Image (cartoon, helix red, strand yellow):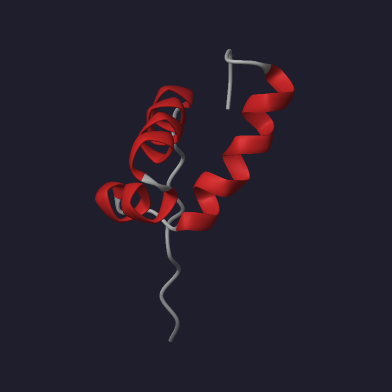
Amino acid sequence: MMIKKIRKIHTDEFKKEALALAERNGVSKAAKELGIHESQIYSWEPKRKLLGQRCC
């Protein structure tokens, strides 16, 4: 039997803070600190640039 993993939904505020932390400390270190995968931070960056600072 397989156990289904529940996906976390991060708020826009969390994403903004994660991106700011990644800019200061680097993506790898920020991801480890926040307990998320580096690819999540990389995927949020283009969305922030497209929508401006309003959203991630």
How many numbered discs, if any?
A: 0
Q: Which residue is drawn at 43% across and 86% down?
A: 1
| Residue found at the far top of this picture | 54
Given residues 8 and 3, the one toward you in this image is 8
Given residues 23 and 56, the one toward you in this image is 23
- On screen, residue 2 versus residue 35, left or right, reads right
Q: Where is residue 32 in the image (x, y as percent from the top left)?
A: 30, 56
Q: Position of residue 23 (x, y in %)?
A: 43, 35
Q: Where is residue 19 in the image (x, y as percent from the top left)?
A: 45, 34
| Image quarter of residue 47 | top right
Q: Residue at x 54, y 56 (%)?
A: 39
| Residue found at the far bottom of this picture | 1
**Residue 41 versus residue 56 in the image, above or below:** below
Given residues 4 and 41, the one toward you in this image is 41
Q: Residue at x 74, y 24 (%)?
A: 50
| Image quarter of residue 17 | top left
